[in-house]
Image (cartoon, helix red, strand yellow):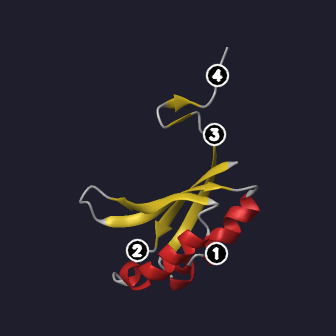
Amino acid sequence: MKFIILFEDAPDADPDIRKTHMAKHLDFLERNADKIEAAGPLSDTDRQGRDGLWIVEAGSDVEVDKLVHEDPFWSTGLRKSYSTIKWKQVFSDGARLIHPD
């Protein structure tokens, strides 16, 4: 089952926290590449990096929660909160993944 994880960064987090912990965060993503298919920061209208998004393949919300809390960014205080949204992918790489009647 696919999930979209939307992260909200803490507004009072140290501005350098992302840079300081990025190597550990990327190591974590690589170790979990079998579950975390894509990840990256979002940008506001001023093109300032903020918040984040993951696309995850997991068996349950519990598995997703475990991943989120194991991410080095979580324990640093960068993240204020996150939302987990179940997602049914119907199109990828230029092709339909479903074939309705």
Cβ–Cβ under 8 Å for marks 3 and 2: no
In this rendering, the label closer to the viewer, 3 or 2: 3
The residue labelled by disc 4 is: 99
- The amino acid type of the residue labelled 1 equals His
Which residue is pictured at 64% across the width and 75% down the height?
69
Provide the secondary structure element on which disc 2 rests.
loop
The residue labelled by disc 3 is: 88
Checking the image for residue 69, the label placed there is: 1
Looking at the picture, how far across and down is residue 23, in whole percent? 44, 81
Mark before the other along the chain sequence, 1 or 3 = 1
Mark before the other along the chain sequence, 3 or 2 = 2
The residue labelled by disc 2 is: 11
- The amino acid type of the residue labelled 4 equals His
Which residue is pictured at 65% across the width and 69% down the height?
67
Spatial CA distance of label 4 from label 1 is 37 Å
Looking at the picture, how far across and down is residue 41, in whole percent? 41, 63
